[in-house]
Amino acid sequence: MRFQLSFLLQATASLAQLTSSMLEKHVDSVTLGSSFNPIQESYWTGYPHHRRTPFAVSPNGASGYLAYLDASGTGVHIQPVDPKTFASTGTPVTVAGAKEAGGLVAHDDGFALLTNEPLPAGTANAPGTTPVPVLYRYTDGKQTWKTFLGGPSVSTSAGFVASPDLNGDLVFSEKAGYYAAYFVVTSYSGGFSGHFGDAIRYVTPAGKIEQIQGASSDWGCSHNTGIAFEAADAAPFASLCAEDQGAIWLNTRTQGMGNNGVKVSNEVTINGGSNEPMGGMGGSYSGLARFSGKDSYIFSWVSRGAVDLSLNEWMGNGYTKSKPRTTNRNVAIALFSDKATLVGEQAISTVGAASGDDQINWITSGSADHSNAHVAAFSGDAALVTYEEIAQPTCDFEAMGCRGVFTGTYYQLVDGAGKKLGEPVKSLDSFVAGDMVTMGDGRICWPYINMDWRLDGTVRSLPSKTATKVSFACIDLGGAGSVTPPAAEEPVNSTPAAAPVASSSAAAAARPSSSAAAPPAAATTPAVEETPAASSAPVAVASSALPVGGSDDISASSAAPITPPAASSEPAAVPAPSQAAPSSAAPVPTTSAKVCPPRTRRTVTQTVYVTRS
């Protein structure tokens, strides 16, 4: 999230709860110059995720910018937007060749864009056609500078790196005097070749990369499965990473996943998967927010909880693995008193402990599955937590997402101490699909696509969609109300099920309740063009096998698909993948973590199997 400190409203402490009148929608307010595919396949499962549309507003509040990937999959367009009416204004800028709208910062005279793109043909030591990360600065519609953050021009301790999928974010601090980008990388030279990690780059306003001791990183969280990033008054900036060895770390000071860092949460993981805590593919934005005028932050994510802690033999002493408390995912938040200090206790690393999640502040409970969690701050005293729900989920895959009928987006108000204020507001026709921005008038606003949102199958089994319009939604604590009449939204008054909090007895994973509410009918207000799916047959998930611990590949398999079982009251049992190291190499300790790549779904022409770690 981005906020303008001098304009924020401060009087929220006495607010009781959100009401439906506080949710306003500007449906189809932005007309795009090019078409946009609003849906992105999740890694491994192929389930639908919102394709991110980065949104940012200038410090003076006069200019807004919306970035989106062309429906062709090549070219990122940056559309100026009126931050008062959310209508298209001015002339859009196109960054030809760009492959992902990875992060956006607005300035009074233009913007900066984090993206990735292939290097020009003939470039020495290029990674073929694999994109590399790059930062652009535009002033008054013209390119001011362009700085590659990977590729052969950037020498790193991990060799040359590329970013087939960024899955990260871009922030800027005028006080610190830096842009900072946090994103996933894969090495294509040297000893780390074929492996995945993540990198943090600090860039001056003139476009120069600066290597800052204790802040910059070439290879932080190996097998990164989620990023949360926010600016601070000085480097290092506030950062978190999720990894696939069993935890989420506040790694502001360490930039990695070493057990000398701050362990926010124990998580159930498999190779390349940790429950999509920060949104998975298309996520890793608006997950960490700074409270206005303060040094404190709030973080949101989804989790299955953790019970029965055991030693992570691959990582060694000080690292643990766990079993899930629930088959579904619930929403949690954590508070930080400053960019590097967790409020309350860290997650424990006690081998043999029956419960590993007692420290978590749960926002939801029960058997519904929750995803796409985000957070933004209204002021120094209140924040908005958002998430999506499937009331009766089928969870076919361990440590991945779930499928089922979408039963609403929820908007929950919390105070500066992390306490829920009243019940959440539910909406069936608004979603969070881009950065949540705190506006100068105190509202929190974000972009979304007006469409029939479905979570009951894979992307390939559902009708394909393209859009030429973008909508905006806002939560206004002043209660201005809906600009466009809503299809359905309501405060949630039902009594929640028991929270997933550990008892003192031996813990066991809770099963979904058989009394889950029946899914309401989905809103049918599509504002996108739909192409019917090729077949209405049972969903097939493209994959060669379930993820296997220690196996590293950098391509989506073209092997026969796996067909998930039919929906039932109990999620399907999925064999737990092994977490053993590759047989050809023993684990080699590093100062932070093992070198194991995060698995990302994309189409390439070769499968690479790495035999060392």
Image (cartoon, rainbow, N blue to C red):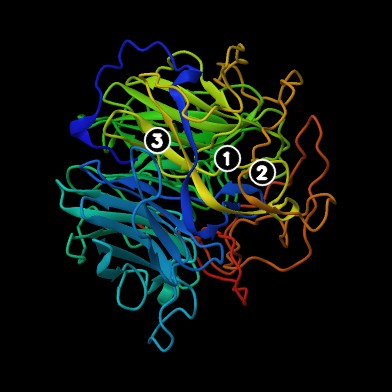
At x 80%, y 37%, the residue is: 567
Q: Is residue 542 above or below residue 417?
A: below
Mark seen at residue 398: 2
At x 59%, y 33%, the residue is: 429
Quarter of the image with the N terminus is top left
Observer-nearest of 498 and 434:
434
- Left or right, 337 with respect to 364, comes to left
Label 1, on which residue?
Answer: 268
In the rendered image, residue 325, in percent from the top left (x then y), is placed at 61, 29
Given the image, on which type of amino acid does mark 3 rest?
Cys
Badge 2 crowding class, 10 Å Cα cut-off, few under 14, some 14 to 19, many 20 or more, is: many
Q: CA distance from mark 2 to mark 1?
A: 8 Å
Element carrying mark 3: strand
In the rendered image, residue 306, in percent from the top left (x then y), is placed at 56, 32
Label whose residue precedes the other's in the sequence (1 or 3): 1
Badge 3 crowding class, 10 Å Cα cut-off, few under 14, some 14 to 19, many 20 or more, is: many
At x 18%, y 60%, the residue is: 204
Q: Are marks 2 and 1 in contact (CB under 8 Å)?
A: yes
Mark seen at residue 226: none
Element carrying mark 2: loop
- Left or right, 564 with respect to 501, comes to right
Label 3, on which residue?
Answer: 445
Badge 1 crowding class, 10 Å Cα cut-off, few under 14, some 14 to 19, many 20 or more, is: many
Which picture quadrant has residue 18?
top left
Given the image, on which type of amino acid does mark 2 rest?
Glu
Residue 200 shows up from this direction = no
